[in-house]
Amino acid sequence: NMSKPVCNVGSIVRFLDKADGRDKFSKTLQYGSRFLMYILTRSDPKNMTAARFAGLYAACRDARKLNRLLKVLNEYQKAISALSTPDEMTKVLTVVSRIGYAVYWFNDNLSWLTKSKFLNYDAESTNAFKLNAFRGWFIGVLLSLVLSIRKIFTLREQIAMLQARYNNTPPIEHGKIGKKNVEKKPNWSRPTSRLCPFWSICCLFLAALNSPKSLGSPFNDGVL
């Protein structure tokens, strides 16, 4: 019997065939190159290998911009879908959050098209595009964080209600459905459950400090 391969090539190919999977791969390559560039230039600013990674980082950064064209339509669709949400606060936060992301994608597209010489905007307009993009991203991340926190508290309340209902039910009436509902509750001791709001806070913090001077000062390439 042949031993099973260490990695499933078919799964990797299916992942890369998806636009989102391809973008995640490009993002990993982009920021991995940026980090290695930073590490190598700390000891030798003229390191040739660092220059290669710098070129790869810039190429991946610009290439990923092409996949973002018309992504504002995705945000429009998400905002329209959110209008049917029964909870008013969730509806408002979701719609405004998607609008923030739409502002980011729209201005990011304009900035890239100007850099590609397809549009003829001056430097002042290009800087305005970048500033508006940062502001839109900041609003989107901030409200997404608020939504995540609200969802966590809502889930915890639902879990408490199910647990109380289960505890107050005689053992003979404990059916599989009741047990299944209680057992399906999220385990907040697991790292994945605790890290969701943590990563949202990190994204918000980075978005603020890496924005133009109106929102803070930028980090170095190693931190980013």
Image (tube, helix red, strand yellow):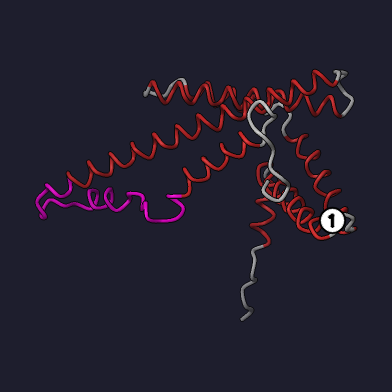
Q: Secondary structure at mark 1?
A: helix
**Image side of residue 56 versus residue 158, left or right:** right
The kind of residue on which mark 1 rests is Ala
Q: Residue at x 74, y 29 (%)?
A: 69
Residue 64 relative to residue 85: left or right: right
Find residue 211 and report its image quarter: top right
Residue indicated by mark 1: 50
Residue at the image position 70 percent from the left and 29 percent from the top: 212
What is the quadrant of residue 124 in the picture? top right
Segment colored magenta: 165-194
Is 178 covered by the magenta stretch? yes
* Residue depicted at x 63% and y 25%: 135
| Residue 100: % across, % down | 59, 24
- Would residue 172 be counted in the magenta stretch? yes
Residue 11 location (% of width, % of height) = 64, 57
Secondary structure predominantly adopted by residues drawn in magenta: helix
Residue 52 occupies which quadrant of the picture? bottom right
Vertical arrangement, residue 116 with respect to residue 48, above or below? above
Q: Position of residue 7 (x, y in %)?
A: 65, 66
